Amino acid sequence: MPSFSDQFSSALPYEQYLANGNEEQQRRWTQVYDIAQVDSAQRQLISGFERKMKVLVHSGIWCGDCVEQCPLIQRIAEANPAKIQLRFLEREMSTELSEELRINGGSRVPVVRFYSEDDLWCATSGDRTLNRYRALALKRLGPSCPTGILLPEKGEVEATIADWINEVERVQLMLRLTPRLREKYQD
């Protein structure tokens, strides 16, 4: 299997990745991108990141979960492109990698892998955030399972982008606090 460095260099930036989709796929991704926003407080947080991180999204241009989450991850990366290097890799490009990234026994996407600036693995997240699961539970489990903790549909995008920001921030803090990088940058 190719190294992370090889995978990352062969992966595509968002716009190039999106261009590989058909017209309908591009339309769906663009609709979500257009409504996804990083608010000013979130932008301030992300713009304060000091460590570079590489983020590789194992995705499917055809996948509904990818449509509803990957544009949000792109919006986050746009808030600090100098520190967040984001690339997309089509799931169908590597069956071996798909096997390695199975979640709960299934070949799922999106799977987001976070690495340090020097290609050391930090975290893997996917295929859905907590708020995505809550929204799906509300839709699929219905009124027979009221919990009172499920978000209304209106807030799903905002809640999901907040989930992803939390994960990106968690990795940023990991990188910021690691003795190896603190020694390197004398901070």
Image (cartoon, rainbow, N blue to C red):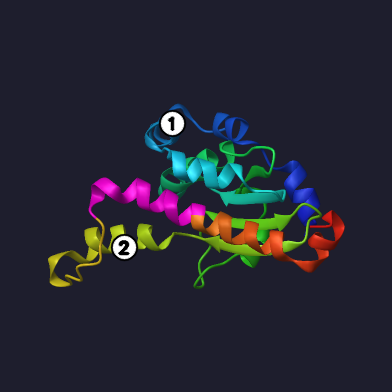
Q: Which numbered mark, 2 or 1, is in the foreground of this view? A: 2
Looking at the rendered image, the quarter that the C terminus falls into is: bottom right
Is residue 91 at least partly visible in the picture? no
Three-letter amino acid code at disc 1? Thr
Residues 28 and 78: in front is 78
In the picture provided, is 138 more to the left or to the right than 89? left
Residue hosting label 2: 134
163 part of magenta stretch: yes
Q: Is the magenta stretch mostly helix, strand or loop?
A: helix
Residue hosting label 1: 30
Three-letter amino acid code at disc 2? Arg
Q: Earlier in the sequence, mark 2 or mark 1?
A: 1
Which residue is drawn at the image coordinates 54% and 59% (left, top)? 167
Answer with the quarter of the image where residue 181 lies.
bottom right
Q: Is residue 165 above or below residue 30?
A: below
Region of the chain picked out in magenta, as a range = 152-165
Task: Report x, y in % for residue 68.
Answer: 41, 45
Residues 42 and 152: in front is 42
Task: Report x, y in % for residue 180.
Answer: 82, 65
Q: Is residue 83 above or below residue 129?
A: above
Q: Is mark 1 on a helix, strand or loop?
A: helix
Which residue is drawn at the image coordinates 32% and 50% (left, top)? 156
